[in-house]
Amino acid sequence: QVQLVESGGGLVQAGGSLRLSCAASVRTFSTGAMGWFRPAPGKELEFVATISRSGGSTDYANSVKGSFTISRDNAKRAAYLQMNSLKPEDTAVYYCAARAPYYIGTSSHSSNYDSWGQGTQVTVSS
């Protein structure tokens, strides 16, 4: 498993922006697809965004499509979530997750991810 550490969360007003980072503690950034998730009422974890191993393919939840952008820099062993036009309903702990290296495609299912970070709190005030 890969150790993941998120950062970049905080308090922001509605309409503002935040950029979350996810750093991998490994000698080589040998992970497959990566994703961002957050808890939601009635769900254990809600899918937010995912990116393939190469970074060439991405997918988003409908609720964040057009406002959030996921990216990764394999040379820096990091993944990012740029969040724009934030709304109070985006308030949550955001978790970064990684799939094993041979799973190169995107996935919106939390059960497909092998490694998880500790989460970073995002609070959007109205």
Image (cartoon, helix red, strand yellow):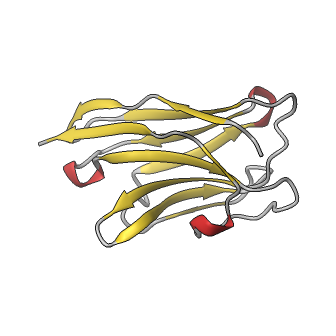
Judge by depth and name the residue closer to the eye, 44 or 107: 44
Q: Seen in the image, is 37 located left or right of residue 112?
A: left
Residue 4 on image: x %, y %:
64, 37
Residue 8 lies in quadrant? top left
Identify which residue is drawn at 80% across, 50% down.
54
Q: How many marks?
A: 0
Identify which residue is drawn at 44% across, 46% down.
94
Which part of the image, by quadrant, shows the C terminus? Answer: top left
Identify which residue is drawn at 85% across, 53% down.
101
Residue 106 on image: x %, y %:
69, 64
Residue lying furthest left: 126
Q: Seen in the image, is 102 located left or right of residue 72?
A: right
Q: Is residue 4 above or below residue 42?
A: above
Q: Is residue 79 above or below residue 69?
A: above
Residue 99 on image: x %, y %:
74, 56
Q: Seen in the image, is 13 located left or right of residue 105?
A: left
Q: Is residue 34 above or below residue 42?
A: above
Residue 118 on image: x %, y %:
52, 39
Residue 50 lies in quadrant? bottom right
Identify which residue is drawn at 62% across, 68% down.
111
